[in-house]
Image (cartoon, coloured by chain):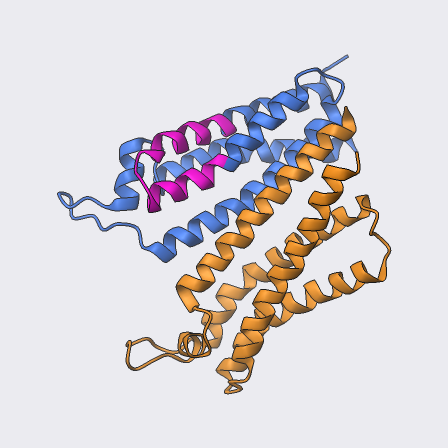
Chain colours: A blue, B orange
């Protein structure tokens, strides 16, 4: 069972930084880059993102996020249920993950001011997921 | 504590499921539309709006990742029914059958529309709502179970 969990955790560990890398080359990971991708830039002759392309992007993100949230939190609870801050870190991870697609949609359809909240929640869930993965790996292999 | 943590994880997963269903409905409304004409024109093309007909290969490209995703999503959501009082009932067995059947019809009815069976436009629309409806019903049962069965 431990090799199975190790395998999954290593794959999640690979996914998290690569997701940042891919996002930096697609939608962007700075306020300016995201707003240029979504709304275009007349000075640089860049078109805004098409509505259906945006909706498909968000739809796909939700699917991947929900599967990641379910698997990582299941492993984390299984390995660290006896620790005091398990529920807190898991709640924070999922709340920030949940905020990501919602605030991105709000940015596109309502106001570009949501970009800051989107970016904060995007980096927050990645950081907490990374910590949860490392803690799970530690508990699985190195904890006494 | 273990039980409580799993309760949280499942609740959040259900919230994500609602977001996923909502986004798919918005995409359907935006790309295809819910009327008979809009579905027919989406697949067979429309001279008035200069849209070309879909090809079998093009449809397959869209449907292929969805076959896996529909199966996985339905299985994950439905398997949580084990934790409710309604598991092993005829009602749930029927809902499971209906979910997978509606997913199958939703995915493959466009091929029959392309083949000239325009009746399947209705099948596409009905199966879409049926798939969403059955999953929303399951989500409702799960939320109820999480809230009341402590």
| Relative side of B37 to A141, left or right | left
Which stretch is magenta?
A99-125
Point out the residue furthest to the right here: B88
Which residue is located at x 44 percent, y 54 percent? Answer: A56
Point out the residue furthest to the bottom here: B116
Percent across and percent down for residue A23 are 40, 39
Which residue is located at x 81 percent, y 47 percent? Answer: B82
| Relative side of B56 to B73, left or right | left
Percent across and percent down for residue A34 are 31, 38
Which residue is located at x 54 percent, y 31 percent? Answer: A95
Q: Magenta includes B59?
A: no
Relative height, residue B89 to residue B44 (above, below): above
Point out the residue furthest to the front here: B148
Percent across and percent down for residue B118 are 51, 85
Name the quadrant containing residue A102.
top left
Please name whichever residue, B39 or A81, is drawn nearer the observer in this view of the structure: B39
Point out the residue furthest to the top here: A144
* Quadrant showing the N terminus of chain A: top right
């Amino acid at each position: 069972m431990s090799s199975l969990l190790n395998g999954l955790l290593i794959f999640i560990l690979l996914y998290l930084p690569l997701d940042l890398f891919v996002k930096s080359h697609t939608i962007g990971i700075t306020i300016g880059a995201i707003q240029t991708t979504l709304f275009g830039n007349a000075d640089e002759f860049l078109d805004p993102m098409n509505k259906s392309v945006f909706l498909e992007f968000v739809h796909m993100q939700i699917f991947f996020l929900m599967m990641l949230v379910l698997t990582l939190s299941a492993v984390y609870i299984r390995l660290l249920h006896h620790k005091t801050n398990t529920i807190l870190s898991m709640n924070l991870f999922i709340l920030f993950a949940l905020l990501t697609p919602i605030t991105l949609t709000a940015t596109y359809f309502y106001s570009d001011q949501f970009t800051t909240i989107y970016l904060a929640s995007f980096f927050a869930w990645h950081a907490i997921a990374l910590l949860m993965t490392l803690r799970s790996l530690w508990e699985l292999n190195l904890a006494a | 504590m273990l039980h409580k943590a799993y309760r949280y994880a499942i609740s959040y997963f259900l919230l994500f499921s609602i977001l996923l269903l909502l986004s798919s409905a918005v995409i359907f409304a935006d790309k295809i539309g819910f009327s008979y004409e809009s579905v027919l024109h989406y697949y067979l093309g429309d001279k008035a709006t200069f849209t070309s007909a879909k090809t079998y290969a093009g449809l397959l490209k869209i449907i292929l990742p969805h076959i896996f995703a529909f199966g996985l999503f339905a299985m994950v959501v439905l398997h949580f029914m084990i934790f409710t009082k309604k598991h092993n009932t005829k009602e749930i067995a029927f809902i499971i059958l209906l979910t997978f059947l509606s997913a199958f019809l939703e995915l493959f009815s466009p091929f029959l529309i392309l083949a000239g069976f325009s009746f399947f436009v209705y099948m596409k629309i009905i199966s879409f709502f049926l798939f969403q409806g059955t999953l929303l019903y399951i989500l409702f049962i799960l939320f109820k179970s999480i809230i009341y069965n402590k």
